[in-house]
Structures are given as structure tokens and as C-alpha cells.
Image: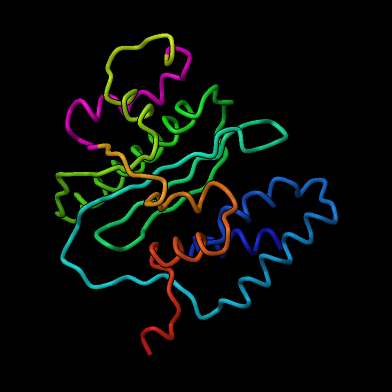
Amino acid sequence: MIGSLMYLTSSRPDIIQSVGVCSQFQSKPKESHLSAVKRIIRYVLGTTNYGLWFPKTDSFQLVGFCDADFAGDRIDRRSTSGMCCFLGKSLIVWSSKKQATVALSTAEAEYIAASSCCSQLLWLKTQLADYKLNVSNILLFCDNLSAINISKNPILHSRTKHIEVRFHSIREHVQNGNLDIQFVNSEGQLADIFTKPLIEERFCKLRTELGILTSSLFS
């Protein structure tokens, strides 16, 4: 069942976080894990008329949102990175993944998430260049001011020297003007849906803003 749900996440971003959590317990599942999987399936069956909407647009601006749930895993205390990338108003990339290392602070977890999203945005830029579509201004929205300040500071200090080198590439791209990282408040953070469980009202709001809409709106 988990394998089928993982396949479904390629077209249903709204279930990727919950499916990712359940997939961690495939080797030794308990009754509670089976109940969680069944709940996801019931949700999917109840929303079969929902899908990603790609509106017609002339905009080819790349915009990313990144977020992290600091030490959200109660077993190993690792954080979860969530990110989504838009081409114009269309959602084209999304991810919910547990970080490989234990972050020591919220700022570090958010910084790692921002670095991962930066890499994805720059890769998308190279792919668009192959189609003669030049993207000059890439925006990345983060809801943690400390992580933004770290990405704009080219000097390593006690707060950042322990972070793996590969995550510091975002600094170079910010300094070179390849990426503009800006602050967004928690209410406007679209990647929130990829990092942790949300109340129904918040979940439905973000689902709509991501462009996952019901077909009845267009009939």
C-alpha cells in the first residue's frame, strides 16, 4: 500500500508528508501505522476529483518556498525539510524529506532546507535554459530570519562552522545574485504542508494555494 501511495505523491502533493511518515515504519509496522495508512487512502478516495491545476500564463519566473520542522521526529530527533517550486503560478516540484543530519537549532534546520531548495531551483533554471527560456530572477521564500541572515553572511562563525560544507553553496549563489532569498511570514509559507500535520482549515487553505483544486470549479 505504501508503494502505491508513494507513486501517487507524484501527482498529489497534499499527501506526500503523511505518506513519508508512514513509509518509515514499513519494516516493523504496528496497528497504529496501518490505521494511518487507511486514513490516507480514505482521504484520497474522498478527493478523487482533486488535481493539480496549471493555469495559462506567460510568466516563467521561478519561485520557491522552503520550510523545516525542527526535531520533529520523536525517534531520532531529525528535522523534516519541505519545499515547493513554482514556474509562474504552476506548482512543478515539491518535496518532503527527513534531513540526513540532526540540526542543533531551528535556524540550522531552516538553512539546510533553504540550501536544498536552492539547488532544486538552480537545476530547474538550467533545464529551462535548454529550451531557450532565460530566467534571471529566482525568488526563494523562507520564514526564518536567522536562516536568511546566515545565507547572506559569507563569513563562517561559531553558529555555522559545524554545518556540512555542501549546504553553504547557497551563500555563493546569494552573493552572486543568482538567487534572492526573502522573508515570508508563517501564514504565507506554502511549504508548511510538507513538513508537519496541520489542522483541517490550514491544510485546505494551503492545498488550494498550491493549485490542488476540485474539477467542479471548472465544469
Of residues 70 and 42, which is closer to you in this image? 70
Q: Which residue is drawn at 62% across and 55% down?
A: 18
User: Which residues are drawn in magenta?
Assistant: 161-180
Q: Which residue is drawn at 25% across and 51% down?
A: 62
Residue 165 magenta-highlighted: yes
Residue 13 higher or lower than 129, as above or below? below
Quarter of the picture containing the N terminus is: bottom right
Which residue is farthest top?
158
Of residues 46 and 56, which is closer to you in this image? 46
Residue 143: image location, x then y, percent:
38, 40
Of residues 188 and 138, which is closer to you in this image? 188
Which residue is farthest right?
31
Residue 100: image location, x then y, percent:
56, 31
Residue 215: image location, x then y, percent:
43, 82
Visual colour scheme: rainbow
Q: Which quarter of the figure has residue 107?
A: top left
Residue 22: image location, x then y, percent:
69, 52
Residue 172 magenta-highlighted: yes
Q: Which residue is drawn at 70% across and 36% down?
A: 74
Q: Is residue 202 left or right of residue 115?
A: right
Quarter of the picture containing the C terminus is: bottom left
Of residues 8 and 112, which is closer to you in this image? 112
Q: Residue at x 63, y 71 (%)?
A: 43
Q: Is residue 71 left or right of residue 34?
A: left
Residue 167 higher or lower than 66, as above or below? above
Q: In this view, does 181 lie to the left or right of 207?
A: left
Q: Is residue 176 left or right of residue 27?
A: left
Q: How many labels does the image show?
A: 0
